[in-house]
Image (cartoon, helix red, strand yellow):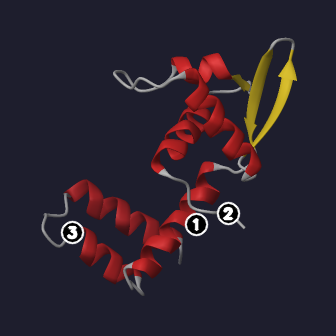
Amino acid sequence: MIKRLPDSEFEVMEIIWAHPSPLPLTTLQIMNHMKPGRTIKLQTLLTMLLRLTEKGFLTSERIGRERSYTPIVSKPAYMQVETEAFLARHNIRSLSGLVETFYEDRDISTDDMKELYDRLDQKR
């Protein structure tokens, strides 16, 4: 079962998911792709990578002196779990309820409306 990640671990997974193939990524490569202005100590990153490995999100292997990481859980699979948890936590039971909640205080752009219609048409 996929568990919800803390924001800091999710940030690391986003870097790994966004990286074009070929994988795996080394610790240094992950560190170099942190958001600009985001400083993180190497030991902190290593701890997060160890946790992500223990939680089953990554595999890890030692190549020479460097450790490298490959994702096991895909971003779409994780986002589905995250979305379902959000819906349950906020007691939203329908797609229309989700859309209503999201756009309650803002206008729906023409592009957003078209995208919603297109997605709904694909499900027919």
**Of all residues shown, which one is farthest toward the top?**
65
Q: Nearer the viewer, residue 96 or 50?
A: 50
Q: Earlier in the sequence, mark 1 or mark 3?
A: 1
Of the numbered discs in the image, which one, if any, rests on residue 2? 2
Question: What is the CA distance from the residue labelled 3 to the residue labelled 2?
Answer: 28 Å
Residue 116: x percent and y percent?
A: 36, 66
Label 1 neighbour load within 10 Å: few <14, some 14-19, many 20+: some
> What's under tag 1, amino acid-wise?
Val
Q: Quadrant of residue 97?
A: bottom left
**Amino acid type, mark 3:** Tyr
Distance between the Cα atoms at labels 1 and 2?
Answer: 7 Å
Q: Secondary structure at mark 3?
A: loop
**What residue do we see at 50% from left, 52% from top?**
6
Q: Of the numbered discs in the image, which one, if any, rests on residue 81?
A: 1
Among numbered discs 1 and 2, the one appearing first in the sequence:
2
The residue shown at (74%, 44%) is 53
Q: Nearer the viewer, mark 1 or mark 2?
A: 2
- The numbered mark at residue 17 is none
Q: Are marks 1 and 2 in contact (CB under 8 Å)?
A: yes
Q: What label sits on residue 103 in the rendered view?
A: 3
Q: Sort mark 3 into few (<14), some (14-19) or many (20+) by Cα contacts within 10 Å.
A: few
Q: Secondary structure at mark 2?
A: loop
Q: Is residue 112 above or below residue 41?
A: below
The kind of secondary structure element at disc 1 is helix
- Residue 19 sits above or below residue 110 on the image: above
x and y, in percent, of residue 34 in the image: 47, 25
Q: Please identify the residue farthest to the front as the structure is shown.
A: 43
Tell me the amino acid under the disc marked 2. Ile
